[in-house]
Image (cartoon, rainbow, N blue to C red):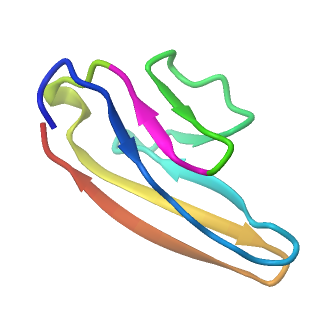
Amino acid sequence: AHSGSSVALACRAQGSPAPSISWLLPNQTRLARSSAGSGRARVEPDGTLVLRAVTVYDRGLYTCRAESPAGSDSLAVKLQV
């Protein structure tokens, strides 16, 4: 990603019941749809993590986690700025 741009990291999960999706940020902060976030980061209803005005400090490993009573799964995405 280019510094100053917005980034959308998709995380798709299906199941019954529908899994809840959260993201673990590089600074170990967990962010979910119900979280307030830092103002620059938010989780969309479909689980996509949106980061606004990224800087080199936003680079790192972002981990999407989908959880439901049936189990859980995760996906790591590396962001380079």
Relative to residue 10, is residue 31 depicted above or below? above
| 11 falls in the magenta region | no
Along the horizontal axis of the image, is 49 left or right of 81? right
Relative to residue 71, is residue 22 depicted above or below? above
- The total of numbered circles placed on residues is 0
Question: Which residue shows up at 51% across the image and 15% down it?
Answer: 39
Quarter of the figure that contains the C terminus: top left
Residue extending farthest bottom: 70
Residue 72: x, y in percent? 66, 77
Question: Which residue shows up at 43% across the image and 58% down it?
Answer: 63
Q: Residue 1 appears in which quarter of the rendering?
A: top left
Q: Residue 31 appears in which quarter of the rendering?
A: top right
Q: Nearer the viewer, residue 57 or 16?
A: 16
| 48 falls in the magenta region | yes
Residue 11: x, y in percent? 51, 59
Q: Nearer the viewer, residue 8 or 58?
A: 8
Along the horizontal axis of the image, is 56 left or right of 19? left
Residue 44: x, y in percent? 61, 39
Question: Which residue shows up at 52% across the image and 50% down it?
Answer: 23
Along the horizontal axis of the image, is 50 left or right of 65? left
Residue 25: x, y in percent? 42, 44
Question: Which residue shows up at 52% across the image and 47% down it?
Answer: 48
Magenta segment: 47-52
Q: Nearer the viewer, residue 54 or 26?
A: 54
